[in-house]
Image: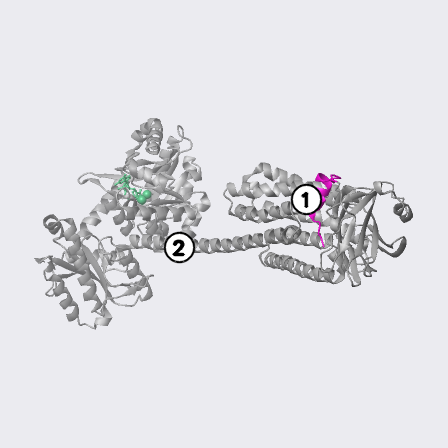
Amino acid sequence: MNHHLALRIVLAALLVWACMPAHAGTPQVLVNPGAPIQAHFEYWEEPTAQASIDEVTALPQDQWQLQAEGEGTFGITSSAYWLRFSVSNRTDDRQNLIAELAYSQLDDVVFYVYSGDTLVRQVRTGDTRPFYPRDVDHPNMLARFTLAPNDARTVYIRIETAGSMILPLRVWREHAFYEAAADEQKLHFFFYGCLTVIILINLAVFLSLRERLYLYYALAISGYLLFFTSITGFSFQHFYPRAPVLHGNVLLLSMPTLALFSILFCLEFLRIKAHSPRLYKALLAMLGFELVYFATILLVSYNTAILLGAVSAFVFFSLLFIAGPISWAEGIRAGAFFTVAWIPLTVGVLATAGRALGFFPENFFTEHAMQIGSGLEAFILTLALADRLYREREQKFRAQADTLREEKARSEAQNRLNDAMTHDPVTCLPNRNRFEWMIDRQLAEDPDGHYMVGVARITRLDEINRTLGLSRSERLLKTIAQQMMELAAKLPITHAIHDSQGRIERVYQLSGDSFGILVDVRKASGDFTALDKALKQLSDPVQLDNLAIETHPRFGAASYPQHGDTAALLIRNAHVGMEMTPHGRFRTGIYSPDHDIYNESRLTLLTDLREALNQNQTQLHYQPKVNLTSGEVVGLEALVRWHHPERGWVPPGEFIPLAEETGGITELTQWVVAQALADLAELHRDHPTLTMSVNVSARDLVSSNLENLFETQLRRHGVPADRITVELTETAALEDPERGLKVLQALNGLGLRISIDDFGNGYSSLSYLKQLPATEIKLDRSLILDIDASEGSRMIVATAIRMAKGLGYQVVGEGVETPDTANLLREMGCDMLQGYWVCSPQPLPMMRTWLAAGFYAAVDRVYLAQKR
Ligand code: C2E
Ligand code: CA
Ligand code: CA
């Protein structure tokens, strides 16, 4: 039972047309007891296909040619072939024999069994007629005949077929045939079963993953299955025995089907397009050819179709054969699988070819080489697909884990940033910002309460620093902070809150040497002995490295509501109280307005400021803001300067808070806005794109009519609104969030740009900042300060920049004093910078000169920084 598979067709078509050697020998088949029957035969090719059996039996002997192997492949031919062989029974038993042409695709076959000159049996079969009736229920061409002892038969077979004239003749004892047929059947079921399982698995994977790859593979294997079942006649016998036309066409269609989907699978599986454009083009061309072939297959003649199929199978096979190693060489893992999978198929094809050509002997392996090869191929590729599935899932898991890790790192960095902005770097205590925020919140929650803000200052810290050195005095500070926390924890009257990470806050660090607590006076009910005891302990010398160090703390306090109704004022007054005559045993100075020496001088200072504003003793200095990548000067920031007739230069850090507290800020801002816009209008003549940043204070948002002010001044100086940026400190906006937001929106409505100043030095509730109509964020000087030196600061600034950019802000770095800092900021993605390194704040005339020359100077500097 021989099977002639894809390569048979290739071979038939391409290689072995009519190259049949003739062998001399006995045209006899002898049946000895038990011995296998050797089927030599003689044949006669009859080109006209007209001869009758009588003419053939009368042929002279020299017309017959011997085929010693009992098997012949004659290619595609329109001739009819006649086969002749004789069998004689040399046994004592009657023999039931079967003559077989072991190829299921022959169109028309007639067996004539002669006893001497008498025709004893005639069997007509072939696959162009309905499957049944058949002499034997089997897809191959079979005829039974019997031989009495010492009897002989001569059998003539006439074959006419489209497709290949493949004639493997066997003669069987009946029982041997059935045994072999049953074995063959088992093998078939196993092979088809395996392919079916592979198809189903891949279909299931396709349905759940929706990846075309698996569908292509399932369809390609279905093509194989179709091909094998139809070329063996299995499907004809079992599925459509009444439809011989269908049978012929299924075989034809199975070839382009399997090729088409194999190519699609290969393209997708090996990602050919990405690495081998030429192979990709070749496979696409092949794909196109297979499509055309598929479409026209039923239109051309059967023989043409078979021929095309053979040629295309040859090209297809070669292309896929090289696709594996090429992809493998390109580093595609699937390429290795593909190569390995294609090897058994190649071996199978070669073995089948070799057997067909007579190079290899007939045995189980050569006979089933194609099935074994294609089965192994399908199996290895299924493994490859499973491997791919596994790896993809692994990758997905890994990617998920990576994202989780990244997210964690990001949130950790955010927490660190938050921490850095709200905690003291040395003691890790919450800082002044937190303290103010905590007090304001508490007062807002409990406006009728009675509270006391207490501050402590280590008055000898400077001296200690000088004698002990910085690192030891830092340790001293830590020790003191620790002691304060422990003491406060024992005092239920100190107000305590939890921060967002669940840490408890009781003691705050207001500056390098001062600390603060909030005392709930009502909880004390007049009894402050515990507090006094704690303060006494704090006044005792601190033990450090076997030294008892006198810290000389001083304590001050201010009460709510008597001494103030905001945190800022209460803290200030508590500090003032510290300077006053101490009450009680432990040097606690309680604030009293009568003794507020600062009040007086501050009041005169304020009067002076008002006067200065009127008499133009104040002036504006300008500091450029440059683009970090282009070096271009983007704009100027207006910074107020005041030269006091007696005191000399008063720094804005001194009089601006004062003006804010007393309401003088409104006039200051009015003057600044008017002056800055006038100057800008003038500068625009030479630098029409220049912008101007003006600082606006928290109080302005509440008390000044900023909208009106800007509208008037913009109109008056004819400056476009989008050239003005309003800089607002982060904390300023927060004091009255709702009101602040409204005013900012109004300013934004005028066309002004909003910038968040001193970012990183406030509460930085990002969720609030996000609501502001701001487009720019200025990183606070204190953050930038030591990024050259400290990895931690770098990390914090990098995070701040990433976060700000993520929210769509332009980022300005402030206080840049060195090229290293500039360079670091540029690497972190900062957009603009300001600082002494580019230019310190300058009066207008000098700024004008600088702008004329400095534009290029700034470009050069940034450029230099980039080249470093
Ligand atoms: P700011 O808005 O953050 O202004 C930047 C401050 O950093 C300015 O201090 C500037 O001179 C200084 N500066 C610039 N580059 C560097 C540098 O490279 N290194 C260092 N160490 N400092 C640099 P200034 O002029 O003393 O102003 C202090 C603060 O006063 C300003 O901080 C701003 O909040 C406020 N201020 C100044 N002018 C006005 C104003 O007209 N109106 C209002 N409301 N506030 C103002
Ligand atoms: Ca500013
Ligand atoms: Ca600033």
Q: How far apart are marks 1 and 2 (CA)?
A: 65 Å
Quarter location, residue 33: bottom right
25 with respect to 625 (left or right): right
Q: Is residue 765 magenta?
A: no
Whether residue 481 can be seen here = yes
815 or 672, which lies in front? 815
Mark 1 beta carbon near ligand 1 (under 8 Å): no
501 or 410, which lies in front? 410
Q: What stretch is highlighted in magenta?
A: 1-21
Quarter location, residue 10: top right
Position in image of residue 266 (x %, y %): 60, 46
Q: Which image quarter is the C terminus in?
A: top left
The answer to whether residue 200 is above or below residue 780 is: below
Q: Which mark is residue 405?
A: 2
Position in image of residue 610 (x %, y %): 26, 44
Q: Name which of mark 1 and mark 2 comes first in the sequence.
A: 1
508 with respect to 580 (left or right): right
Q: How many numbered discs sit on the rendered protein?
A: 2
Whether residue 291 can be seen here = no
Which residue is tagged 1?
Answer: 358
Residue at 60%, 53% in the rendered image: 378
The secondary structure type at the circle numbered 2 is helix
Rendered image coloring scheme: one colour
Q: What residue type is labelled 1?
A: Gly
The secondary structure type at the circle numbered 1 is loop
Residue at 26%, 55% in the rendered image: 432
The answer to whether residue 518 is above or below residue 319 is: below
Position in image of residue 461 (x %, y %): 13, 52
**Which quadrant of the figure shows ligand 3?**
top left
